Amino acid sequence: MLANTPEGATFFVMEKDTPGFSAGKGEEKHGIRASNTSPLTFSDAFVPVENLIGDVPGKGLKQATTVFGYTRLMVASMALGGGEAALDIAIDYAKQRVQFKTTLSEKQGYTHKLIVPHVVRFAAAEAFIEEVAEKLDAGQQGLEVEGSIAKLFATECANKAAEDAMQALGGYGYITEYEVEKIKRDVRITSIYEGTSEIQQSIISTFRWKKTRKSKGRYYESIGEEMDRLASEDDGFGGRVLALAARALNQTVQLVNDHRLTRQQYVMFMLADIMTYVEVGASLARRAFGRYRSGDAQAEDKFICRLFAGEVSQMAFGSILRIVTGGGIFDQKAAADFLAAIALNELTTGCQDMIADMDRLADIVFER
């Protein structure tokens, strides 16, 4: 339990038979119905000092923050598993369902809209989750922001994938027997508990903004340099596009700081989304290129990396455009000058040959 004490928020163990403590009727929930949720009531319930977590009161928020790097990564993994399960059902269904003399797996309206984008995003989520998990296993501390990035990205992607899996099955998707509607209900909670997506956006944008200022722009510039080095060896992993996005983000963070747009929560949310996609994209490219170097590359690695780099470019392009033109800080000419200075239009190259790459990835996913 976590409660306020004179010294501040404090964690403690509350035994279920403690006088004055009672649990109410179980709630009827949208999903995760097998997990009991009920209101807890405390009336002069006495907690002995030995039940304090950490022995010293007032350390609750610090203790909670310390574990968020772990627990939010766990929620991200849960969401990833649920989303992938829904996608597996939709992929298998598409191989069997014939519509107008061909299976759904042959139709771009099904594959390219409802399936392939999620295959790409889940590969990116998995790469980032594994990278953070390896750092945690190695004893690295201070990964709370990485936990937030993993949770924000994986849970939002899983929710969208489960929604599209229901759509992919048509009327069957709405029927309990086919399971995807249950997965959709269950996976929905992952973007709410352990901190909502909006809380994660606040954490990511605030701490990465501060890190960018403290490092004088080196944090995202170093990602750009790393992606440039990768692209110089083999530009098939989207490294050049990711480098462009990282540098455009870097300069936009500086702009937001200089014009005090950090006070506008919506602007900070847009920054958080770009930050998330840039960092997840770099992790995906890093992992795929590592496999390529070691001779363990998978056939789909380059297609997935290029497609996700394209998503990063679209995310960065749209969000930066809205910040600069919608933030009320520039007239039309000044906005155009800034966008030209950060080479925003070059990000459109991230969509080069996108449909062809989706065709190739669909061939692999649907075993065509």
Image (cartoon, rainbow, N blue to C red):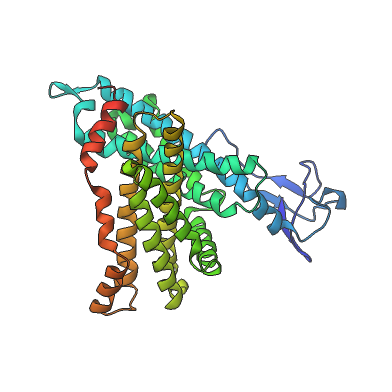
Q: Residue furthest front?
A: 233
Whole-percent x and y of residue 94?
27, 25
Can you say whether 101 is above or below 306 in the image? above
Is 104 rendered above or below residue 52?
above
List x then y, in percent, for residue 119: 36, 35
Q: Which of 126 and 100 is in front in this view?
A: 126
Point 30% across, 35% down: residue: 115
Query: Does residue 7 appear left or right of residue 310 in this picture?
Result: right
Tell me: 245 left or right of 200: left
Q: Quadrant of residue 138?
A: top right
Q: Residue at x 28, y 56 (%)?
A: 347
Q: In which quarter of the image is the C terminus?
A: top left
Q: Where does residue 257 sit, x and y in percent of width and height?
A: 46, 74
Eyeballing the image, is 14 above or below 90? Answer: below
Q: Nearer the viewer, residue 258 or 31?
A: 258
Q: Is residue 28 visible?
A: no
The outermost residue toward the left is: 100
How many numbered discs, if any?
A: 0
Relative placement, left or right, of 308 versus 198 is: left
Q: Where is residue 254 in the image (x, y as percent from the top left)?
A: 44, 71
Q: Which of 91 and 335 is in front in this view?
A: 335
User: Which residue is located at x 46 percent, y 39 percent?
Assistant: 287
The answer to whether one can see residue 275 in this image is: yes
Residue at (59, 40) in percent of width and height: 134
